[in-house]
Image (cartoon, rainbow, N blue to C red):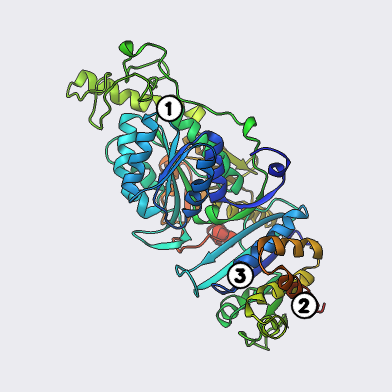
Amino acid sequence: MGGEEERRPKLIQGNEACAEGAIAAGCRFYAGYPITPSSEIAEVLSYRLPAVGGTFIQMEDEIASLGAVIGASLAGVKAMTATSGPGFSLMQEHIGFACMAEVPCVIVNVMRGGPSTGLPTSPSQGDVQQARWGTHGDHPIIALTPWSVRECFELTVRAFNLSEKYRTPVILLMDEVVGHMRENVVLPDPSSLEIFDRVKPSVPPEWYIPYEDTSFGVPPMAPFGEGYRYHVTGLTHDVRGFPTLREDEIEPFMARLFRKIWSHLDDIQTWDTFQMEDADICIVAYGSVARAAKRAVLEAREKGKKVGLVRLITIWPFCRRAIEEALKGCKVFLVPEMNMGQISREVKRVVRGRGEVLTVSKALGRLLTPNEILEPILEESR
Amino acid sequence: MKERIEILASGFGGQGVVRLGQVMGMAAVRQGFRVTMLKSHGTEQRGGYVRAQVVISKEEIDSPLVEDPDFFCAFSMAAYNQFGHLVKDGVILYDPAFVQVDESKKVRQVPIAAKDVAVEKLGRAIYANTIMIGALTKALGILDKDVVLSTVLEVIPKFKDENKRAFEIGYDLYST
């Protein structure tokens, strides 16, 4: 990339922008098993990665794909995979492993209709709670949801930065609309991007304690192959990485696993607002649905209704503060989703009776229309 | 120009519906417009239903959905039946080889005999979508003819002479 040609607006798909974002973020390893509607990410990386000295592998399935990604990351290479619902289900075990062993990696899920093979070519937001709780055991997770082609690029870069910074798997939750949508976009100059690389140990191998707590909560990570030998396991482990059953080791480990995310919410959580200044009705939306919701805000305003939009960019950990701030002016919340009501549960949990939460939950394999989004509010005023 | 211009194209897989959307979108981007384009299709590799939704605007585009198309290119009867009702005061361009229009519709319906003309003048039906692109370019009126043509030749790098002729034929087939 670079040069004048790259700065001209192009008409590219979200999936292509995601692949370019990965390259710009420093991703040099991709292992995956192609699946609609994410396949273009693999397609682009299959020729872009070798061109920059990276590695592309088509694996035998999604379980092996994430296994390979974790291995590459432990060897010090930024790595990712991309899939859709059925493959994401298969990856859950390894997502848990990456949480436990604190291996940075990016998992892209371009959501399609489910459950099971569902609606392969149609959009959905049905994997939102799966991204949060799909793997077993208590664990924090970071997940981001882009709403435009440019944001597919930006959030892929951000996903890598957050995974490197916090040594955690980061899930980029796209949907079929965002993945396949073509949109005019000028991709950012890669040299203008802030890129975060994992912190490596500053001590010699014999002093290295791989899971030692730090004030930031994230231990430095030594790449395999540079002389640092340590143990990596999915078992609950002590600071040296060896399995433990001791409460005095389990407790601080679990506490740190959560602390490293929860004490940095300011850095991790982002959301956007539109016309919220004087709003008394708040639409909470994310991904492609937020685009229809933005139009719905404009149409509602034409009808004299003070509607605003809170668009979630970080979807996990859930942006409680975005809702708390909206609660200062809004008593009605409207949550449109291409699922049967997954984020509306979170909104209800935060609102806790301090307002009314209305839902537009449709898992029909298509994007919601602005009119459908407005239906519950217009009904209310009748 | 309206705040947003919406184009809908639909037909069977293999008729060049997505290609058409891509060409119009790219040409619009080259002329400084904002563009979104959605493609929807069934699970089949070939023959299933395909739809392209293109929105062209001078402003940033929020919803990429085409709900009130200004131009609807119907490549099949199924497409016409499924999406014809969305057109409220736009224009329907249809290929009479595949579509029999409902004369009672109160909107302008323009036959573009893309398939038959492609076979007759260029020897192969595959040029039908380029003919439709030519007709749509004239109908749209906001895109520069040469820019669209050069985009066609870039997106479809084969048979340049034939595609150029197909485009010109289509452009002349549409009368405003």
Which corner quadrant holds the C terminus of chain A? Answer: bottom right
Q: With A161 as the anchor, is B55 left or right in this view?
A: right
| Chain ID at mark 1 | A
At x 59%, y 48%, the residue is A148
Q: Residues within 10 Å of mark 2 (few under 14, many from 20)?
A: many
Vertical order, A344 against B53 (above or below): above
Three-letter amino acid code at disc 1? Tyr
Question: In this figure, which residue is indicated by the disc labeled 1?
Answer: A166
Question: In this figure, which residue is indicated by the disc labeled 3?
Answer: B17
Three-letter amino acid code at disc 2? Ile
A293, A88: nearer the viewer: A88
Image location (x, y in percent) of residue B29:
72, 54
A269, A382: nearer the viewer: A269
Q: Dot 2: what SS?
A: helix
Q: Is residue B5 visible?
A: no
Quick check: do tags 3 and 2 share a chain? yes
